[in-house]
Image: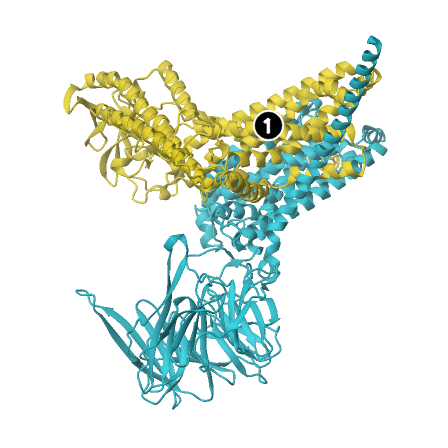
Chain colours: A yellow, B cyan
Amino acid sequence: MRDWIKSGDPWVWLSAGGVSVSLVAVFGIILLIIVRGLGFFWPSDVMDAVVVENGSPSRLIGEITEEESIPAKLVDKTGSEAEDLDTLRKRYLVKVGNRDKFGFDFRWVPKDSIKETRYPNAVMVVERREWGNLYGYIKSVSVDGKVVAEGESAWTKLQELLPGIHALHDQIRNIERDEIGSINYKIERLRLKKRKLELANETDPEKFAELERQKEELNIQYKAFQDQLIGLYQEIGKDSFTVEIMDGQTVDIPLSKVVRAYRPNEMGVGSKIAFYAEKLWEFLTEDPREANTEGGIFPCIFGTVVMVLIMSVFVTPFGVIAALYLKEYAKQGFLTRLIRIAVNNLAGVPSIVYGVFGLGFFVYFIGGWIDEALFPEALPNPTFGSPGLLWASLTLALLTLPVVIVSTEEGLARIPSNIREGSLALGATKAETLWRTIIPMASPAMMTGLILAVARAAGEVAPLMLVGVVKLAPSLPIDGNYPFIHLERKFMHLGFHIYDVGFQSPNVDAVRPLVYATAFLLVVVIMILNLTSIAIRNHLREKYRAIES
Amino acid sequence: MENTTHMTSTVRLRTWRMTKDVLARYGVAIGGVGVIIALLLIFLYLFSVVIPLFRPAHISKGVSYPIPGPTGSQTLHLAMEEQHEIGSRFTDDGKITFFDTSNGHIVLEQVAPIPHGTRITSFATGSPSSGIFAYGLSDGSALIGQHFYTVTYPGDKRLITPHVSYPFGETPLSVTAHGALVHLAVQADEDSGTLAGVADSGSVEVVRIGRIRSFLSDEVRLDITHATAGDTHGPILELLVPPLQRSLYVAYRSGEVDFFDITEAGTPQKIQSVRVTAPDEELTAITLLTGGISLICGTSTGRIAQWFPVRSDKGIPELTFIRDFHAQNAPITGIKPEYGRKGFLTYDAEGVLGIYHATAHRVLLTQELSPAGITSMAVSPRADALLAHAGDAIQFRLVDNEHPDISWHTLWQKVWYEDYEKPAYVWQSSAATDDFEPKFSLVPITFGTLKAAFYAMLFAIPLSILGAIYTAHFMRPEMRQIVKPSIEIMEALPTVILGFLAGLWLAPYAEAHLTEIFLNIFLTFPVIFLVSYLWSLLPFDMRSRIPEGWEAALLVPIVIITGFIAHALAPGIEDVFFGGNIREWITHDLGITYDQRNCLIVGIAMGFAVIPTIFSITEDAIFGVPKHLTQGSLALGATPWQTLQKIVLLTASPGIFSAIMMGLGRAVGETMIVLMATGNTPIMDFNIFQGFRSLSANIAVEMPEAEVASTHFRILFLSGLVLFGLTFLFNTLAEVVRHRLRKKYSSL
């Protein structure tokens, strides 16, 4: 034993342990996110059981979402027949839905109080636009207040009616959001134009009259859409169906409130996979519903992508030029040391400090100045003087600058010097050498830098909270209204969505799966970006090695 | 001919090429230096936002004009309204003169309804923002009035109109039957008013006026309570009733202050009698600070002292000396509190104006206004202008005093706040009430930052450095190729995800399975130790199946199994040692508060965020140790471990140091994990089971609510600057050390 300790072997093993623990942690975290994130869309079976609590039986319809073992006395002090309070007991978190009727979505149920569990095929899950899911059995379908189908045929009738309802719903949303939104936007622009004329002391009544005329025209259009909407709402409000829920009451639900209705117990693996794909697609392409707790995350994806693109436009040239200077032009000396220290510090400055700087300098200082110079008609409402897309992008460009510099520099360093010398020997100027040979060769390295910068920016949240991200943006930063790209708008962001939904939402149990799914998406995007950059870098290394030899 | 054109075009082309070359050179150089400019810009901008916090106050030259209103009468009181456009002067003949502050033109003149045959013998004002005032009359009665202002915009121009009303009626209320009121104090709000007066005879009288509205009609009836609080025992300087109307201070010129409880107006209780001046000093001025808790006392030596009631051991409030200022030399003749802040202005017998802030313990300005001395003074409600009655003139001056409430002392030292039992470090930036005393101590949040960094490093340093040592020195290259990027990719994992997992998954899990977490922490390494010993006992041919350098792979299942063992053992152990519930055991038996989102969680989560940083740099440093050194050592017969200890670690130690610095920099600045995995309460306690608030999280939480350019806003910038400074220090240190190391390696 003493010899063994003296040999140093145990210490080697101990250090190996450090690696193992780190590896287990890394893969554990990723696995946790994958499992939780991907499980969200799977239609799990719905049970219909009898629960005996406090001696009285009651009916429970819902999905088991979680289980855990805890000491019996914490489960339920008046527990059914648990005498030994120190033993562990299993309990389930059951999603019972019907929040509008019961006031809660989730319930903890001790395992041994659940009796007579059945999984009947007829049990139905209704995803609603308000109040979350509903579980129960369909009773009848009515059109215009008259019952048209009952029992099993009600289910087929429901499935028949739903596509039409969805088409109507899409139409309504299209009018409300796009058409009327566009008209409102134009009216607001007219108001600003008028204010601008007033500020310029314009006296020509003709110009004001012209604006009034345009406004009148828009109002007429608006009226037409309003009338159309009234008709559509009447149309969509006609159909409804009734459902028997777990406490035996019958609930009447208008079809217009239904996103989809399905019977998970009846589905085979094939249809479950199809359902899963549909839900995943909805998650990626739809707007969020019910204060971000349901529906999709499309605006977040869109906002993140647009912000990252605009950021790239700023950070790439700046980063590449700085790297070119460091590697190709500057004499290695005091100045380059200083620049390197600056680069390292920029990389090390906490991201929240960038946020503070961005808010103070970009938003209030530059933005306030732009507002006074270019948008005086909108004051006191800020245009660029409040957090928005442009400032968020600029702040993150500054934040990711070191990533691009370091990566590009590394790429430049790997280019064999005989290529530069060859080009110079043939009479090219330094600028030409750079432009024609070095930059094309280093472009994959720049690409790597940019990809890493994008990955960093996509996951960064703290500074964005200060310079332009909001929990719910009314409109996307790019839309069909002139000038199409709205740099001053606030936007939604994947990372912030995770923070906001996970921590600011009143119903944590209900939103947790959604947050896991969002986190999973973010992790996937960032991992793919990082792995791509690693692959490009490795490829480059091989290539240059080939040139050099 | 053709040749020359060809020649000129070649020359032109060459010139153009050279021009481009030069342009590119300068363009690129600007880009390169731009990086330094960017960093400097961040620093300088933050600095420029913070600097106004520490600037002293300034007053403008201002204007001076003859006293408006009656010339033969004495000025009792001066006041100004919100926009400091209109000033008011109260004189002892009962006249109230409102005038334009910029030129002294009279706007409105009113006469108080003083009954015939009586004279004004004393005057008092309520809390400055209420506009309440009262005249004490020669027949022992008092008249309560109120001045207020309405703002209208005729023709888009602001017009401020002054008004005077008498909220308790135009008939004076009787305070005493023992002669004229020689001293008076007043306070009134919507429902009630309090008058305290000293009669000629020396008795102290308290009158509470309740306003009772009848339910059926709009009639208001006054309910009046009279009481005598005792007799005076010397010349009185001032009577003071705080806005809450629950206490009464009787201040004597000798420096004595009697402190009465008048919560029950019918039965005033004397609580304490205390001397607020030094033995050789006289009390020359006294006033209540806004909020009515603190007394500011000016003495004959020019000293100013702050006193407020502090609850004693017996639970009785006792007037206690808090702090004093020694900026003036002549007897203080008047003190004027600011309306919304704990600041005040003083003037002394030599006509010197002093601007102070109590909480910040800061003298912002001392300046001579008039050698003739100052008779009366008014501060505008926003504290941005003052009126001074000096000699035969009124001076109107603008005051630039944006941020008096911040000093080095308030930020980094213990401060005795009102209603606190002793000086403390407190961060509390806002509250519901207007006269709230903001508490801007950066100590608790800096402490939180360092506490989080400490626990994170406690977790990250052993794991990452051990791991780096093994990966760089012992591990097989094939395995290293996989392991290194795997751990490094953790660095790319967004911290918002780590924070979310920590807050919503780990925190509740750890609360329910605390024993398991600790078992895991304390069990893993002994188990590894044990496994390695058992391994050494195995026969050689079995051991040689797994070559050296793959131990880590072998240990992965062991670590996972240990996790399961801990999971299985935890309930039993909890039962035996902690009575089945460790969480309760900690709160009850150890008496330690347990928050669900605590430092343990942050330590683990932030540890994970920091591990890749430290791991990667340490690994590079160790891997970069020149191979001939290690090979030489091994050739001389040292074991791999000895080589590592004596050669590799020594050579790479600067690199490891710089790795730890970088990790520390990251831990200090991390925002999302801290924000999501702690309760964000700014408390100072090293307890691992309690939360904290860090500088970065504090910025994230409060910045969106801070009003632009306010003190709060600038302090958040200051905390950003502190973060910037801390990380700059760590990063520059790391960079310098690393640069040295690189030089050393290249010379080896």
Q: How crowded is mark 1: few (under 14 residues within 10 Å), some or many (20 or more)?
A: few
Q: Where is residue A464 in the image (x, y as percent from the top left)?
A: 52, 38
Q: Where is residue A221 in the image (x, y as percent from the top left)?
A: 31, 26
Residue at the top extreme of this rendering? B2
Quadrant in which residue A42 is drawn: top left
Task: In the rendered view, tell whether residue B499 sits above or below residue B699.
Answer: above
Determine which residue is flagged by label 1: A313
> In the figure, is residue B287 to the left or right of A433?
left
Can residue B473 be seen at all in this image of the molecule? Answer: no
Quadrant in which residue A165 is drawn: top left
Locate the N terminus of chain A by quadrant.
Answer: top right
- Mark 1 residue type: Val
Looking at the picture, tell me which residue is in the foreground, B406 or B400.
B400
Task: In the rendered view, tell whether residue A323 sits above or below residue B456.
Answer: above
Locate the C terminus of chain A by quadrant.
Answer: top right
Looking at the rendered structure, the secondary structure element under dot 1 is: helix
Say which chain tag 1 marks. A
Can residue B82 be seen at all in this image of the molecule? Answer: yes
Looking at the picture, tell me which residue is in the foreground, A345 or A186.
A186
Q: Where is residue B739 in the image (x, y as percent from the top left)?
A: 77, 37
Q: Position of residue B114 (x, y in %)?
A: 33, 81
Q: How many marks?
A: 1
> In the figure, is residue A298 to the left or right of A254?
right
Residue at the bottom extreme of this rendering? B201
> In the figure, is residue A492 to the left or right of A263?
right
Say which residue appears at 50% left-offset and 63% top-offset: B383
